[in-house]
């Protein structure tokens, strides 16, 4: 089938570039996926992957497990490939509903997740909302608080640059949820964004400057 469950790692970076076994193309985060039927039995290595990954449990079945109840994820990223903001393989979610997994693999259904991947499919991603900067290219300090938040968040710049910044907020499936224009000038280095209407979960804030200033993307949790 191509996968029995989906491990979600939404990194919002270099999505249109390969993250294969060599780990040399600007996406160093990588993990091993292990499964077992019972904690009384040893874990069986299912496969490896990077980004959001379809995981097949056939290796556990072949080893005598009736099913996989427990999933273990081991970060095997090469630390030598990291610069500045890269953070390793942090798991944002696990999808086990068979209907959702199948819809993602086939692209059918109203809730198909178009940002899933397998090792042999290199172009499943919608690349238009991803940061394509090379590793560590962001240089300007930007903060979001409070985080998590149930209502509003404040975004603040450490340094003042007279410019216009477009703030775009995406959900974990890459759908644009909020867009706000921020006119940054001396004395106005903070802006407030209302998240009240958003569902609970993880979101990405992407700042885009009209003057070419580079800012890191920020993750925010809506409670």
Image (tube, rainbow, N blue to C red):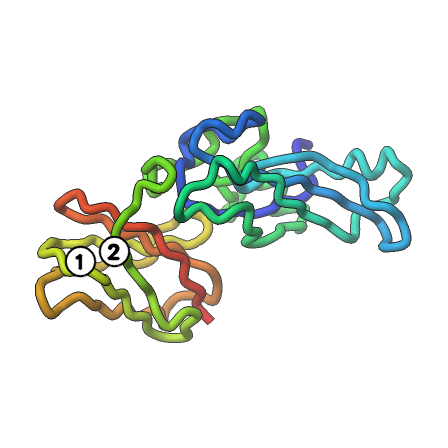
The percent position of residue 113, horizontal first and vertical second, equals 51, 44
Callout 1 crowding tier (Cα within 10 Å): few <14, some 14–19, many ≥20: some
Looking at the picture, tell me which residue is in the foreground, 4 or 71. Answer: 71
Horizontal side of 36 relative to 212 (left or right) equals: right
Residue at 47% x, 67% y: name it: 200
Q: Is residue 72 above or below residue 133?
A: below
Residue at the extreme bottom: 151
Residue at 52% x, 36% y: name it: 107
Callout 2 crowding tier (Cα within 10 Å): few <14, some 14–19, many ≥20: some
Which label's residue is closer to the chain start, 2 or 1? 2
Residue underneath mark 1:
181
The percent position of residue 115, horizontal first and vertical second, equals 48, 40
Residue at 77% x, 52% y: name it: 70
**Residue 41 in sight:** yes
The percent position of residue 29, horizontal first and vertical second, equals 53, 40
The percent position of residue 157, horizontal first and vertical second, equals 23, 62
Residue at 74% x, 37% y: name it: 46
Residue underneath mark 2:
167
Check the picture and name the quadrant holding the N terminus.
top right
Q: Are marks 2 and 1 in contact (CB under 8 Å)?
A: yes
**Residue 108 in sight:** no
Please tell me how many numbered marks the rendered image carries.
2
Residue at the extreme front: 80
Mark sitting on residue 52 = none
Horizontal side of 66 relative to 120 (left or right) equals: right
Looking at the picture, tell me which residue is in the foreground, 213 or 7. Answer: 213
Residue 83 figure quarter: top left
The local secondary structure at tag 2 comes to strand
Looking at the picture, tell me which residue is in the foreground, 158 or 70. Answer: 158
The local secondary structure at tag 1 comes to strand
Horizontal side of 94 relative to 203 (left or right) equals: right
Q: CA distance from mark 2 to mark 1?
A: 6 Å
């Amino acid at each position: 089938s191509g996968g029995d469950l989906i491990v979600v790692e939404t990194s919002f970076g270099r999505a249109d570039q390969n993250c294969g076994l060599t780990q040399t193309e600007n996406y160093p985060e990588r993990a091993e996926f292990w499964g077992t039927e019972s904690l009384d039995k040893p874990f069986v290595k299912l496969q490896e992957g990077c980004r959001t990954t379809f995981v097949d449990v056939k290796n556990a079945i072949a080893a005598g497990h009736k099913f996989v109840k427990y999933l273990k994820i081991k970060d095997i990223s090469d630390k030598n490939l990291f610069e500045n903001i890269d953070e390793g393989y942090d798991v944002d979610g696990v999808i086990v509903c068979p209907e959702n997994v199948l819809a993602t693999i086939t692209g059918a259904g109203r809730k198909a997740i178009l940002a899933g991947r397998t090792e042999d499919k290199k172009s499943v991603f919608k690349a238009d909302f991803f940061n394509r900067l090379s590793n560590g290219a962001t240089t300007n300090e930007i903060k979001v608080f409070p985080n998590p938040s149930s209502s509003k968040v404040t975004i603040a710049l450490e340094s003042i640059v007279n410019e216009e910044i477009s703030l775009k907020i995406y959900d974990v499936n890459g759908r644009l949820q909020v867009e706000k224009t921020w006119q940054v000038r001396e004395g106005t280095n903070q802006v407030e964004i209302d998240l009240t209407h958003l569902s609970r979960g993880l979101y990405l804030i992407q700042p885009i400057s009209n003057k070419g200033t580079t800012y890191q993307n920020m993750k925010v949790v809506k409670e």
